[in-house]
Every structure is written in C-alpha cells, then in structure tokens.
C-alpha cells in the first residue's frame, strides 16, 4: 500500500527573521566554526545547543589524519552534553558552516544520533540548519530521518 509522508518545517529567508533566542544560537554555531579542524575538507562546521535550563554550549568538527576517525560538530556536541548534562534536555540544536554558501544539514550518522538523544530524553529537539544568511528549522529530528534505526 502506497503511503505519503509529509514534513512540516519553517523556512527563514533571512537569519534576522528567526526568533531572537534562535538567532543567538545560530550566531554561536557560526562562531564555533572558527574552532573547527578541517584541513582536508576545508568545510568548517559549528553546532550549538540550548538546554531546557537555558544554558548553551557549542562544538565544531574535527578531521583526523587517520580518516575516518574525525567527528562532526553535531555528534561532538551531543556526546559531550549526554555525558555531562543528561538531566537537562536539549531543546534546540543550531548548525552552521564556513563556507556558508548553502544551509548546513546534518549527515546520516548525526541525524541518527540526534534522534537517539530525542528518544533518550523523551523530548523533541528543534533543529535549525543555517547558511547563506537563510535557515530551515524543524521541530523534531525524527523529521530529518523518518525511517530511523531502532534496536
């Protein structure tokens, strides 16, 4: 039986259209791109989260000479938060890149990990993907990966 999957999202043609708290989080993600170690791809990614308590944290991607040992900014950040602030749910995750000629979307592994965190914390994570002074936001990571892996 054929079925239809629809995904609702918000599109912002300018970052200034974002709610103030989201705009600030995107700016923090953009700032985190400066700490990226990306000598091979030259694609610097930053991620920032806002927790339920209001605290924010950020991380960047790290490439290694022993590929594929590097780690995306999103997973670096999520693993840190899950290890240190597991009792404070993530409300929003913002992603940015440099160069920022297009919006930065999480890779498949990151999408699965974001969904894993949502499931563990029993709370959806709003994801904001920014670049080129635009952004797309979804209210749950499951919308990025509707057919997720489940044990």
Image: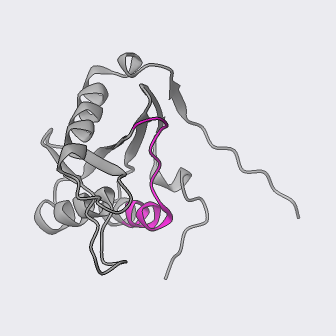
Does the segment drawn in magenta span residue 80? no
In the rendered image, residue 78, in percent from the top left (x then y), is placed at 26, 60
Q: Eyeballing the image, is 98 above or below 123?
A: above
Q: Nearer the viewer, residue 1 or 9?
A: 9
- Residue 86 seen in this snapshot: no
Q: Quadrant of the N terminus?
A: bottom right
Q: As drawn, which residue projects farthest toward the right?
A: 1
Q: Is residue 102 on the magenta stretch? A: yes
Looking at the picture, how far across and down is residue 39, in whole percent?
A: 29, 60
The x, y position of residue 121, in whole percent, is 30, 60
Q: Nearer the viewer, residue 96 or 7?
A: 96
In the rendered image, which quarter is residue 3 located in? bottom right
Rendered view: 129 above or below 148: above
Give percent across and percent down for residue 116. 39, 67
Task: Between residue 108 and residue 91, name the one nearer to us.
Answer: 108
Q: Is residue 87 left or right of residue 119?
A: left
Above/below status of 142 relative to 21? below
Q: Measuring 39% from the left and 66% from the top, which residue is drawn there? A: 113
User: Residue at point 26% right, 40% down?
Assistant: 29
In magenta, the rendered stretch is 100-116
Report the number of discs. Answer: 0
Residue 113 visible in the shown view: yes
Left or right: residue 115 compared with residue 147? left
- The colour scheme used to paint the residues is one colour
Residue at position x 29%, y 58% in the image: 38
User: Does 80 sit left or right of 118 as displayed?
Assistant: left
Residue visible at 27% across and 73% down in the picture: 64
């Amino acid at each position: 039986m054929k079925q239809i999957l629809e995904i609702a999202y918000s599109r912002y043609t300018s970052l200034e259209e974002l709610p103030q708290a989201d705009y600030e989080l995107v700016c923090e993600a953009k700032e985190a791109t400066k700490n990226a170690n990306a000598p091979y791809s030259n694609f610097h990614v930053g991620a920032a989260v806002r927790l339920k308590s209001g605290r924010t944290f950020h991380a960047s991607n790290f490439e290694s000479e022993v590929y594929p040992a590097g780690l995306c900014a999103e997973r670096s950040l999520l693993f840190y938060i899950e290890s240190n602030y597991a009792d404070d749910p993530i409300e929003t995750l913002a992603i940015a890149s440099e160069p920022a000629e297009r919006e930065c979307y999480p890779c498949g592994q990151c999408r699965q990990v974001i969904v894993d965190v949502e499931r563990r914390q029993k709370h959806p994570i709003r994801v904001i993907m920014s670049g080129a002074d635009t952004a797309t936001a979804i209210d749950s990571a499951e919308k990025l990966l509707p057919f997720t892996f489940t044990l």
